[in-house]
Image: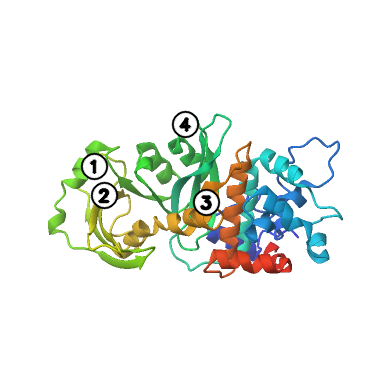
């Protein structure tokens, strides 16, 4: 059912930071959202609807499926209620049908449909400035037509842990050129965009300010003049604004964050504050500490935001690694995937992003356990579709 212009669903979408293509029609049902994805097949000889095949893929990945074969096997013995809900007839699509469709479907159209649906499905998060991490990941087991590994750039909400969008990086270019097209699909007004040093580009800063957003960017030797200027600041006399200590993944880590106002002469547009982050970590099996110091820059000023929020944004950026990339590698074995042809790698990554986001929105803290919970009783997937 369509939502009217005053619908609370639209308020949630606006707060969440993702606007669908047509804000006057926000799909409540996942199958309605998937129906917007164009079918790449010729009409003649079509036996299974595209929306049914996509829904099977989504539900199977929610249950932990990692391959086309696993998706097919999940669909073979579904109870009647689930089959009817997915629009599946007596015979489930075979592995070759699922493989050909998922390798041919447009990944950008699928990501746009899934991202808009996630926005409408999510609850309103606490009213705080959004922090969106931009980071790429290479699907090492997959190869594109040119033989190169498939690289995917994702936008990740640091607070909710939901993937706001993803795009495949053209093998002939790099993440830099994929940065603005990815954010063009997302409402980033007043959000803090965090990214690693690759995206510390003048045109990215101008783009974000033009969209009404803020940036917090790391600075390394790809910007040598800026890096030297930041290193030369009197950090020894500047007090720490934030200290954290963490233990996990077999190591102990501490972080110290310092901030200072940028003086005249810093060669980066709109910069107001410089950031120094010192990380000390050691393995639980070792007594030797490894220390690393990195620098960052932001257009935010002391009057715009509190220092601890800037520190949270800087620290939270790396959450995309263990809250998304690590889960896709370990739970869904993405780096070992042999799906290589066509849009298959990007489409499977979108389905994994959806599974991680949806499990997290429904309160799961352990994504692997949530997948096993669905796999034991397929009927449990139905409430996740609306």
Q: Nearer the viewer, residue 36 or 305?
A: 36
Image quadrant occupied by the C terminus: bottom right
Is residue 49 something that shows in the picture?
yes
Q: Which residue is mark 3?
A: 187
Residue 49 place in picture, x, y as percent:
80, 47
As rendered, which of 305 and 280 lies closer to the eye? 280
Between marks 2 and 1, how big is the CA–CA gap?
Answer: 8 Å
Residue at (75, 41) in percent of width and height: 39
Q: Is residue 131 visible?
A: no
Q: CA distance from mark 4 to mark 2?
A: 26 Å
Q: Tell me the CA gap for discs 4 and 1.
A: 25 Å
> Disc 4 on helix, strand or loop?
loop
Residue wearing tag 1: 227
CA gap between label 4 and label 3 equals 25 Å
In the rendered structure, which disc, 3 or 2, sits on the residue that comes first in sequence?
Answer: 3
Q: Is residue 79 left or right of residue 126?
A: right
CA neighbours of label 4 inside 10 A, class few (<14), some (14 to 19), many (20+): few
């Amino acid at each position: 059912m369509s939502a009217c212009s005053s619908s609370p669903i639209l308020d949630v979408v606006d707060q969440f930071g993702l606007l669908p293509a047509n804000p006057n029609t926000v799909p409540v049902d996942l199958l309605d959202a998937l129906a917007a994805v164009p079918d790449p097949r010729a009409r003649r000889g079509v036996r299974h609807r595209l929306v049914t095949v996509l829904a099977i893929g989504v539900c199977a990945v929610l249950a932990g499926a990692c391959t086309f074969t696993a998706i097919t096997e999940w669909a073979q013995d579904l109870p009647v209620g689930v089959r009817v809900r997915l629009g599946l007839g007596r015979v489930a699509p075979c592995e070759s049908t699922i493989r050909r469709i998922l390798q041919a479907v447009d990944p950008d159209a699928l990501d746009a449909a899934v991202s808009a649906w996630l926005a409408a499905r999510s609850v309103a998060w606490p009213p705080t400035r959004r922090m969106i991490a931009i980071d790429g990941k290479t699907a090492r087991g997959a190869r594109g037509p040119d033989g190169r590994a498939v690289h995917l750039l994702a936008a990740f909400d640091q607070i909710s842990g939901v993937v706001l969008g993803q795009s495949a990086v053209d093998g002939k270019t790099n993440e830099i050129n994929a940065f603005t097209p990815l954010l063009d699909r997302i409402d980033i007004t007043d959000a803090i965009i965090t990214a690693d040093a690759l995206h510390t580009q003048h045109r990215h800063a101008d783009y974000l300010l033009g969209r009404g957003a803020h940036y917090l960017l790391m600075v390394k030797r790809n910007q040598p003049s800026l890096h030297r200027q930041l290193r030369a600041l009197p950090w020894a006399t500047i007090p720490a604004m934030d200290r954290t200590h963490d233990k996990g993944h077999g190591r102990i880590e501490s972080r110290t964050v310092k901030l200072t106002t940028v003086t005249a002469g810093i060669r980066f547009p709109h910069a107001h504050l410089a950031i120094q982050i010192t990380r000390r970590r050691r393995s639980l099996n070792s007594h030797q500490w490894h220390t690393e110091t990195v620098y960052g820059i932001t257009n935010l000023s002391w009057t715009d935001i509190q220092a601890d929020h800037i520190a949270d944004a800087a620290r939270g950026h790396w959450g995309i690694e263990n809250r998304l990339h690590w889960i896709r590698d370990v739970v869904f074995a993405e780096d070992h995937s042999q799906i290589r042809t066509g849009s298959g790698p990007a489409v499977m990554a979108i389905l994994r992003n959806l599974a991680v986001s949806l499990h997290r929105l429904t309160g799961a803290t352990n994504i692997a356990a949530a997948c096993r919970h669905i796999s034991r009783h397929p009927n449990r997937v139905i409430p996740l579709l609306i």
